[in-house]
């Protein structure tokens, strides 16, 4: 997502409701100049982002969902995304729930999500507090099994014992992998490579 895409999507939301950007801002209870062209760049010429609050209020005023807005961002106004499997962490630890590549094969529920251009992705509902304050219990992360990961990436890890956790990938070598938490109350863990079932990269989080 870049500045041009998000402003274009805001313009499209307004146009779909027969309004100008100024009219959309007024309908949302914002300053009428909030979405004006002049507000899309700072005084030094750098591109400026709209605030999350202003976008949320504009979507509410235009009766437009976040899925529809995401489709506009992607340049696919006729799409509200696609259905992908969603699983909870507790169920993710069950034997036989994932294939050998870390993709769920027994998920009954799905959630609609804008197409990321990746075929094998799924949604995982966060549990616990290890990744607070970035990810909280109940947040949903979009996970891509098989993607290349490197130090500093946010990942979901499943051990051969069935433990599933969201962590930050730390140091690793042929024998061990270090997993750290965003919550400083949780100490880093070192796990033997032989004990890891799979590691999947987190692409996106809904919070």
Image (tube, grey):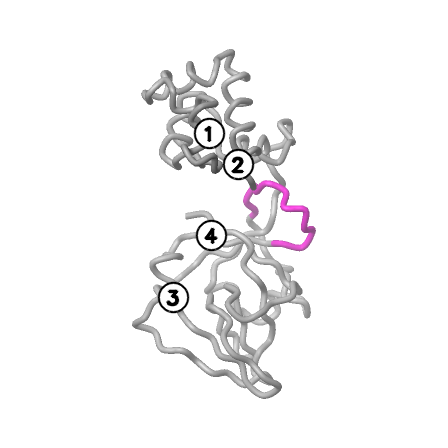
The tag earlier along the polypeptide, 4 or 1, is 1
| Label placed on residue 102 | none
Rendering quarter of residue 183 = bottom left
Q: CA distance from mark 2 to mark 3?
A: 28 Å
Q: Secondary structure at mark 2?
A: helix
Q: How many marks?
A: 4
Q: Which residues are magenta?
A: 110-121
Query: Are discs 2 and 1 less than 8 Å apart at CB?
Result: yes
Residue at 62 percent of width and 86 percent of height: 174
User: Is the stretch drawn in magenta largely helix, strand or loop?
Assistant: loop
Q: Secondary structure at mark 1?
A: helix
Q: CA distance from mark 2 to mark 1?
A: 8 Å
Quarter holding the N terminus is: top right
Q: Which residue is under mark 3?
A: 182
Q: Is residue 69 left or right of residue 138?
A: right
The tag earlier along the polypeptide, 2 or 1, is 2
Q: Which residue is under mark 2?
A: 3
Q: Which residue is under mark 4?
A: 140
Q: CA distance from mark 3 to mark 1?
A: 33 Å
Q: Which residue is under mark 1?
A: 40
Q: Secondary structure at mark 3?
A: loop
Question: In x, y percent, where is residue 2?
Answer: 55, 40
Q: Secondary structure at mark 4?
A: strand
Question: In x, y percent, where is residue 41?
Answer: 46, 31
Q: CA distance from mark 4 to mark 2?
A: 25 Å
Query: Are discs 4 and 3 less than 8 Å apart at CB?
Result: no
Which numbered mark, 4 or 2, is in the foreground of this view? Answer: 2
Which numbered mark, 3 or 1, is in the foreground of this view? Answer: 1
Residue at 42 percent of width and 34 percent of height: 42
The tag earlier along the polypeptide, 4 or 2, is 2
Toward the viewer: 155 or 160?
A: 155
Question: In x, y percent, where is residue 44?
Answer: 43, 36
């Amino acid at each position: 997502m870049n500045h041009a895409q998000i402003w274009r999507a805001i313009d499209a939301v307004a146009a779909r409701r027969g309004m100008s950007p100024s009219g959309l801002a007024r309908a949302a209870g914002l300053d009428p100049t909030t979405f004006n062209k002049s507000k899309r760049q700072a005084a030094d010429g750098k591109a400026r982002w709209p605030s999350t609050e202003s976008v949320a209020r504009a979507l509410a005023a235009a009766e437009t969902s976040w899925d529809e807005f995401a489709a506009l961002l992607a340049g696919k106004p006729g799409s509200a995304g696609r259905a992908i499997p969603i699983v909870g962490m507790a169920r993710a630890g069950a034997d036989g729930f994932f294939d050998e590549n870390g993709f769920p094969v027994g998920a009954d529920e799905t959630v609609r999500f804008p197409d990321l251009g990746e075929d094998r992705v799924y949604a995982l509902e966060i549990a616990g507090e290890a990744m607070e304050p970035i990810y909280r219990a109940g947040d949903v992360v979009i996970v891509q099994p098989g993607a290349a990961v490197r130090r500093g990436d946010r990942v979901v890890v499943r051990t051969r014992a069935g433990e599933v956790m969201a962590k930050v990938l730390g140091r690793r070598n042929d024998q061990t992998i270090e997993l750290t938490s965003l919550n400083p109350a949780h100490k880093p863990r070192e796990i033997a490579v032989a004990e890891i079932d799979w590691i999947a990269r987190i692409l996106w989080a809904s919070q």
